[in-house]
Each structure stands twice: as structure tokens, then as C-alpha cells.
Image (spheres, rainbow, N blue to C red):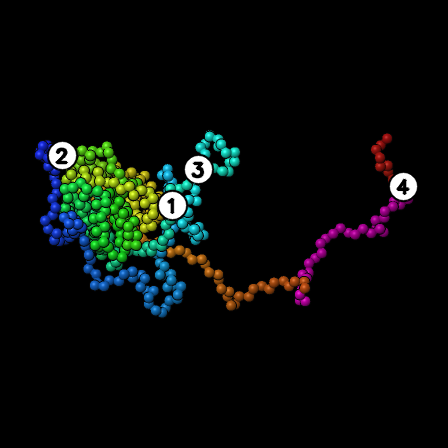
Amino acid sequence: MLTTITDGFLCCLLGKTPNAVGPLDSVESRDGFTFLEVKPGRILRIRHDVPNRPQFPPEFPEFQEEEEEGGEGEGEKTRRRRRGAVRCRRRITLYRNGQLLIENLGNDAECQNPEPDSNNTELEIPDPSGIPSGNPNPAKRRKRKPKKVVTVDCEKRITSCKGTHGDVVLFFIHGVGGSLDIWKEQLEFFAKLGYEVVAPDLAGHGCSSAPPVAAAYTFYALAEDMRAVFQRYAKRRNILVGHSYGVSFCTFLAHEYPELVHKVIMINGGGPTALEPSLCSIFNLPPCVLHCLSPCLAWSFLKAGFARQGAKEKQLLKEGNAFNVSSFVLRAMMSGQYWPEGDELYHAELAVPVLLVHGMHDKFVPVEEDQRMAEILLIAFLKVIDEGSHMVMLECPDTVNTLLHEFVLWEPDPKPKSCPKPKPCPKFRPKPKSCPKSCPKFRPKSCPEPKSSPKFHPKLFPTSRPKSWGAAPPTGPPG
């Protein structure tokens, strides 16, 4: 620590940047890594593992059966062809106060007019409670016109991605202060299963070159680097895995290449909010001061990034080469996180399935942010790991690998078809219906007549009293 403080004072006196990483002299592949020059003088280290497969591997083998003739009807072929197809329909309305209204349109009846006129779409805002409305007619309320209306209407084919499929590539992107070494367990796990994996080092991280200009570490500059890596190694079905700040680059690529990005996995990525650097942050201090405070920053990162702070976690942090960047790069990375387009509307437009993995003890990203992300996204699954924190892929590698593999193999269930009407059995004879009265074969059912009181007969029950009975008793009240 004394050496660090001394170096910090020297850099303040001499005006040099401490712990600066210079550009690499060679771009040749060595030690199983590839060095890709995305721009002149901007070189990224990339780990690219390609399994041993046949020279011409089949793509989408589950859809090749439909091309074979014989043995199947047209309906069965159509069902196989539409396997995994999901229709994504939603209307997103943004109002001037920042309120976002998302309507998921399920059937065709609701989507007859998928693109409403933004000048005619209005939202009814009720009056505040306790304040009487000046309009005597309570049915009329104040209305506001939306600022922007976006309609998503597309069809995605989501299928199971197996290690034997030659058109599947997994991309792993780390966050601030990390390197591709934090994905060691995940890269080895999926490489053994036969998947093709690609993991780059961001500029200034790991063994990638570190330009001495702060503008080289803005979000847009790093996003263009990831675009170059994606265009270099992408195939038909690509799965993006991001951690922390790397989730933003995964979202950017999924938005830019919706046809190529098959699935996205976000690990402790935070909520769907636009990126904006904080003005009151410790990373706004001069690089020499940050260099003096680097031991304190490393200790605070260990405490906030891991659920437990022991010798094992320190060793994992060292092996993962995490938080081992120069103070200049760290300051430029934190101050360059400016991405105003990445708001809730931007995330709501994504029509790709997303898996959200969150460590319960994460002190950098609260679980409420990932819950909000799950609400905004169209197809999202949130999984919380109780034993993990911000560096959950290092703390619980087996659990993370299992969740990621299950999501990679996941595909939506086919829609249940309506039950067909049962065909009548040839031996079945329905009971004959009763013939109407107009039918000549009509025979009324024999039923007993209803019991009734005996008919009145005058001889049995005479109406006049016989004279032998005497006079009738008086009917009036007694005198």
C-alpha cells in the first residue's frame, strides 16, 4: 500500500498516468487466445473455442425432417415448420411525463389496426381525489396526447440450442473492471458440451490494448468494439451473456441485430434505465488520487461484490483478474457511461427471450431493478440465487451453469390444438325420436288419467232438504 501511495504522489508531481496499460505490440494468436484489431491501434484479446464438429454441420436439424418426402401429411409438416414460432405483438405508448403504457396484443382482433395514429390516441387522466371537476358532465375527463407510440409486430422462432448444432455461438461480455477470465467456469462448461464460445476483453481490460484517450472508453466506443466482435464470429443463432455493464452491450446488440440474436442472458445487469454518469462519484477524482485509493477500492469491491469475504473469494478475485485495471481506465469507464437511448422504451421493444439472473446479496444492483426489467421485457424469466452476490458466476458456478444451460435448451411449448369432433361409430345406432302427431305412425303413449273428484250427481246429492228432516237451523246469530 505504501508503494501505491508513493506512485500516486509521483504521478501528481510528474503529471503521468499511473498504472497505464500500453497497446500491444503483436496481434498474433497465442496461448489459445486471439487478438482482433477492431480499429487501427485498438486491439482486443478474445477467447474463441470451436469444438470438433463435422466439416459441414447441419443447421436446424429439427427442421430438416420436413424436407424428407413421404410418411407425413401436410398438416404435420406445417406443425414441424412452425415449431417454436412465437408471435410478438405489443403497443408501447410513451407520454410526456415519462409514463410508459405497454399493451400486449394477443389475438388478431386486437391487432387489426396495429399502428394507431399518435395524434388520435389519448389517455384518460382522472381528476385528483378531493378536487371537484369544473366540468358539470362527469363523463368527460381531461385527456393527453402521447409523445410517442411504438408497435412491435414480429414473429420469432425460438428453438432449443444444443451443443451439436453448428449454427449456435455463445458470446460472454464482462463489465467494468473485469476480464474474460471471470467466465472461466462458464467457458469450460459450455465448451465441453460442444458449444462454440466467444469471450472478449473490453478495451483497457485484461490483455486488450488501453488507448490513452478518455474518449476511447465511452459507451458508444465500446459498443462499436462489441459490434465488430459480433460481426466477426456471429452465426445463425447467437446467444448473448452479459454481466453488470456488459448487459448494456448485449441489449445494444439485440436491438441492432434482432434476426441474429436468438436469446439474451443478463446477470446482475440492473433496471431498464438510461445510462448517465454520476456527478458526485469517487471516480471523478484525478487518476493519481484514485491510484492512491486503489487498495481501498479493491477492498470495497470485495465486500460488495461477494456474499462472503474470505480467502477463497480473494483468490477468485485474483484468478478472475477482476478489478485489476488502471485508475485512468477505471475513471474513463465510469465517466463514459452515457447512453440516453437505453431507457424503458428501448428495452420494451426487444422481442427476444431474456433470462435474468440475480444474486440476492448483490449490493451494487438491488433485486427491484431486475424485477422492473422483467416487467418491461416481453419474454423474461427472473431467477434469484440466494447464495450469490454481484460476482455470482464466480461464487456459484455450478448453479449459474445449470440455469444458463437450461435456458439455452429451452423452447416454448406448442400451442394446444382444439379437440376435433369425434367421428360417429359405425355400430352406433341412436335412439329413434318420437314421431310428431302429424306422422301416420304416431301412437300416443298410454298413461293413466289423473285422479279427480267424483262427479256430482243430482240423485245422489239432492239440492233440496227432505221434509222429514224438519226445518233448517237458523243461519243468523243467536238472539
Q: Which residue is mark 1?
A: 149
The residue range painted magenta reads 439-467
The label nearer to you, 3 versus 4, is 3
**Vertical comparison of 267 with 48: above or below:** above
Secondary structure of the residue carrying numbered label 2: helix
Q: How many marks?
A: 4
The mark nearer the N terminus, 2 or 1, is 1
Q: Are marks 4 and 2 in contact (CB under 8 Å)?
A: no
Disc ID at residue 470: 4
The amino acid on which the numbered mark 2 sits, given as a three-letter code, is Cys
Distance from the alpha carbon under mark 3 to that under mark 4: 95 Å
How far from the left and from the top, in percent, is residue 282? 20, 33
The label nearer to you, 2 versus 1, is 1
Secondary structure of the residue carrying numbered label 3: strand
Q: Which residue is mark 2?
A: 288
The label nearer to you, 1 versus 3, is 1
* 460 in magenta: yes
Q: Are marks 3 and 4 in contact (CB under 8 Å)?
A: no
Secondary structure of the residue carrying numbered label 1: strand
Q: Residue at x 16, y 41 (%)?
A: 213
How far from the left and from the top, in percent, is residue 362? 26, 39
Distance from the alpha carbon under mark 2 to that under mark 1: 48 Å
The amino acid on which the numbered mark 1 sits, given as a three-letter code, is Val
The amino acid on which the numbered mark 3 sits, given as a three-letter code, is Ile
The amino acid on which the numbered mark 4 sits, given as a three-letter code, is Gly
